[in-house]
């Protein structure tokens, strides 16, 4: 992006650009200072408000507060490109937002980065922002923003509002618009948190084409999500979605992704029910690349299911929005569904667009599934991808649901789609994935010698875990076994000592005094450190109450002495 | 209570004393002995009273032993400039700590 506006022109864009240029790429994720916190609070508040559509006031308030804060701290811009850092978001904003669209007080720029960094639910915000972003882009890109507006309106109030704002901004051209513009701009600014949009230039917002880069999946997910909410006319959507879609796919992806999004939405509900079902679903076909990515994301749980979806998606993606390829892919995917690992690998192998998405999704799945799926492990935060996936899933479901299910095993595919695109898929997938993971390792375990070794080992393992916890360093397995042996020996010594002590006291029962004596001899209890101190230090509260006599009401002491 | 929910499966450690295990071990080794129960509960006010009696201190002892062992092996590993605790580290540490714990 070139800094078109001279510094003298304090538009949000220029400010933003300045911030981006000056801010160091470090990612100060931690709360830097009160200012940052204040800023964050402001921004977060603003972001939350914007959703409600009250960006106007927020923007203004934000701008005022944030301006001072933001100016001072350029730190927001974080170098994490992988994540939606303020920097990237701002960049996207700059790229996508039309120069002349809105004249906002400079402050607007600053607040944007802050909340992004801190946003705990970045994913959601990014999703939301993406959604908003899309409408933003649309107006500038599309020649007929009006067309978009109606399409968008039905899905989100914010979008429509933004569109209005953008439209106004565009029309006014440099006219300091009223709050609407400012709010819309701020909204757009705020919203574009996670959008990895990189329009060619500010002056030509219409040409904004974002190279997918790393965000491909996220974008796709968001896009799908967006689509989900509103089934915008594909034509119009093309341009907008483009930035979000994979670079390879280009506009076609966008096109498809849009339908996918609504699909995923609808599918989510079904997803829960039939996650396992292999229903690459008509959605795959319809949604083409957009959906495949989404499906991929959502299907983390089921390898087969995923494979199928992935296959379909990948094939679809490569097919460049051709239903046929999708169809074929879907079918292939279905066949492959049986094979667990294959399907997963398929996903990776195929699809131009899909690969990036698939990989991301796969990374997610890998994380969740931990299966042989190609270690795409785009471990870019399985959570993050899951969030995106969810969005994608959501998008895909509604799309599939809305669009007439393809002739392809519609039911199966549909079901398959459902599980994949589910918005909660990520969550669900994570949950099922964990049990899956847990189950898998458990199953192969052999039931060793039941008799005495098992409970003995089980008890020892408890202490072995404590050992590794205390050590705070990675350990070898042999070392752990060694620890077990030591514990064994230790227990023997312990019993012997206790026996001796009890016998010395003429008792047949081991009492706490014996233990205290033992610990004193061991050097754990000294004159400075009493047993109670140790109890307080190392034992949880419940035990402490049991061991340390304490006086309670009614002239009673517990435990009684 | 004492069982902390294993959320991350990594740094969450169960704090509960494996009473059954401890009692079993003790019984096995010294069947003639008994672990006291702190039976003089004249005042039962504690909701947890029936829960962990005689083995609380034994568990504490084990905890401290494991703790010392871990510290010692960690020291050994750091001295040998290894990032991972090896068997030798643990072995050397065990020798020292067991000797100290003989009482």
Image: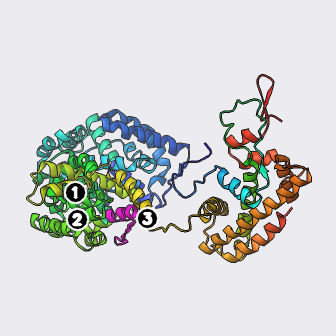
Q: Are marks 2 and 1 in contact (CB under 8 Å)?
A: yes
**Among numbered discs 2 and 3, the one appearing first in the sequence:** 2
Measured Cα–Cα span from mark 3 to mark 1: 26 Å
In the rendered structure, find residue A308 and report the number of the disc placed on it.
2
Measured Cα–Cα span from mark 2 to mark 1: 8 Å
The chain containing the residue under callout 3 comes to A
Residue at the spot of label 3: A443
The chain containing the residue under callout 1 comes to A
Secondary structure at badge 3 equals loop
Secondary structure at badge 2 equals helix
Q: Position of residue A128 (x, y in %)?
A: 30, 46
Residue at the spot of label 1: A416
Q: Is residue A319 above or below residue A242?
A: below
Residue ID at (82%, 63%): B101
**Among numbered discs 2 and 1, the one appearing first in the sequence:** 2
Measured Cα–Cα span from mark 2 to mark 3: 25 Å
Front residue (pair A525, A328): A525
Q: Position of residue A397 (x, y in %)?
A: 21, 51
User: What's drawn in magenta, residue-wise?
Assistant: A360-378
Confirm whether residue A387 shows in the render: yes
**Dot 1: few (<14), some (14–19), or many (≥20) neighbours within 10 Å?**
many
């Amino acid at each position: 992006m070139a800094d078109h506006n001279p510094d003298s022109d304090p538009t949000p864009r220029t400010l933003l650009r300045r911030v981006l240029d000056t801010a160091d790429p470090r990612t100060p994720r931690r709360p830097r200072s009160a200012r940052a916190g204040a800023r964050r609070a402001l921004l977060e508040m603003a972001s939350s408000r914007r959703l409600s559509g009250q960006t106007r006031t927020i923007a203004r308030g934000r701008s005022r507060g944030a301006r001072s804060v933001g100016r001072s701290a350029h730190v927001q811009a974080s170098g994490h490109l992988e994540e939606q850092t303020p920097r990237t978001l701002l960049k996207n904003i700059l790229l996508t937002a039309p120069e002349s669209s809105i004249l906002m007080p400079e402050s607007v720029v600053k607040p944007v980065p802050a909340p992004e960094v801190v946003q705990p639910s970045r994913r959601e915000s990014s999703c939301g922002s993406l959604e908003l972003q899309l409408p933003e882009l649309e107006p500038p890109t599309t020649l007929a923003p009006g067309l978009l507006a109606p399409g968008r309106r039905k899905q989100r109030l914010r979008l429509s509002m933004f569109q209005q704002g953008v439209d106004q901004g565009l029309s006014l051209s440099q006219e300091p618009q009223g709050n609407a513009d400012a709010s819309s701009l701020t909204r757009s600014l705020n919203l574009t948190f996670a959008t990895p949009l990189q329009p060619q230039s500010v002056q030509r917002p219409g040409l904004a084409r974002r190279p997918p880069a790393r965000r491909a999946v996220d974008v796709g997910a968001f896009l799908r999500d967006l689509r989900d909410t509103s089934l915008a006319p594909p034509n119009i959507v093309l341009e907008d979605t483009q930035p979000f879609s994979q670079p390879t796919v280009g506009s076609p992806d966008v096109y498809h992704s849009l339908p996918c999004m609504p699909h995923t939405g609808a599918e989510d509900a079904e997803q829960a029910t039939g996650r396992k079902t292999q229903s690459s679903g008509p959605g795959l076909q319809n949604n083409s690349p957009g959906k495949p990515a989404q499906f991929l994301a959502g299907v983390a749980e089921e390898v087969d299911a995923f494979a199928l979806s992935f296959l379909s998606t990948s094939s679809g993606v490569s097919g460049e929005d051709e239903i046929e390829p999708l169809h074929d892919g879907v079918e292939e995917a279905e066949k492959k569904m049986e094979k667990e690992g294959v399907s997963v690998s398929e996903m990776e192998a195929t699809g131009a667009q899909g690969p990036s998405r698939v990989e991301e999704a796969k990374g997610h799945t890998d994380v969740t599934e931990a299966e042989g799926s190609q270690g795409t492990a785009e471990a870019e935060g399985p959570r993050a991808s899951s969030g995106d996936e969810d969005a994608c899933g959501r998008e895909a479901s509604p799309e599939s649901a809305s669009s007439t299910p393809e002739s392809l095993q519609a039911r199966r595919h549909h079901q398959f789609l459902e599980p994949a695109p589910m918005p909660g898929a990520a969550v669900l997938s994570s949950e099922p994935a964990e049990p899956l993971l847990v189950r898998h390792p458990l199953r192969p375990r052999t039931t060793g010698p039941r008799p005495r070794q098992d409970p003995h080992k089980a008890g020892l393992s408890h202490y072995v875990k404590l050992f590794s916890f205390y050590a705070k360093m990675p350990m070898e397995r042999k070392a752990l076994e060694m620890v077990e042996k030591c514990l064994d020996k230790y227990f023997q010594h312990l019993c012997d000592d206790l026996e001796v002590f009890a016998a010395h006291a003429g008792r047949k029962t081991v009492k706490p005094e014996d233990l205290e004596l033992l610990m004193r001899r061991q050097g754990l209890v000294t004159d400075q450190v009493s047993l109670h101190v140790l109890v307080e230090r190392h034992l949880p509260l419940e035990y402490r109450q049991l061991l340390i006599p304490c006086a309670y009401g009614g002239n009673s002491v517990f435990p009684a002495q | 209570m004492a069982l902390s929910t294993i959320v991350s499966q990594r740094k969450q450690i169960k704090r509960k004393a494996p009473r059954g295990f401890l009692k079993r071990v003790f019984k096995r080794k010294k069947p003639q002995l008994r672990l006291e129960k702190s039976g003089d509960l004249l005042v039962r006010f504690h909701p947890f009273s029936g829960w962990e009696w005689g083995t609380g201190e034994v568990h504490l002892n084990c905890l401290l032993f494991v703790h010392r062992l871990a510290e010692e092996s960690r020291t050994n590993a750091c001295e040998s400039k290894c990032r991972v605790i090896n068997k030798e580290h643990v072995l050397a540490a065990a020798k020292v700590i067991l000797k100290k714990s003989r009482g």
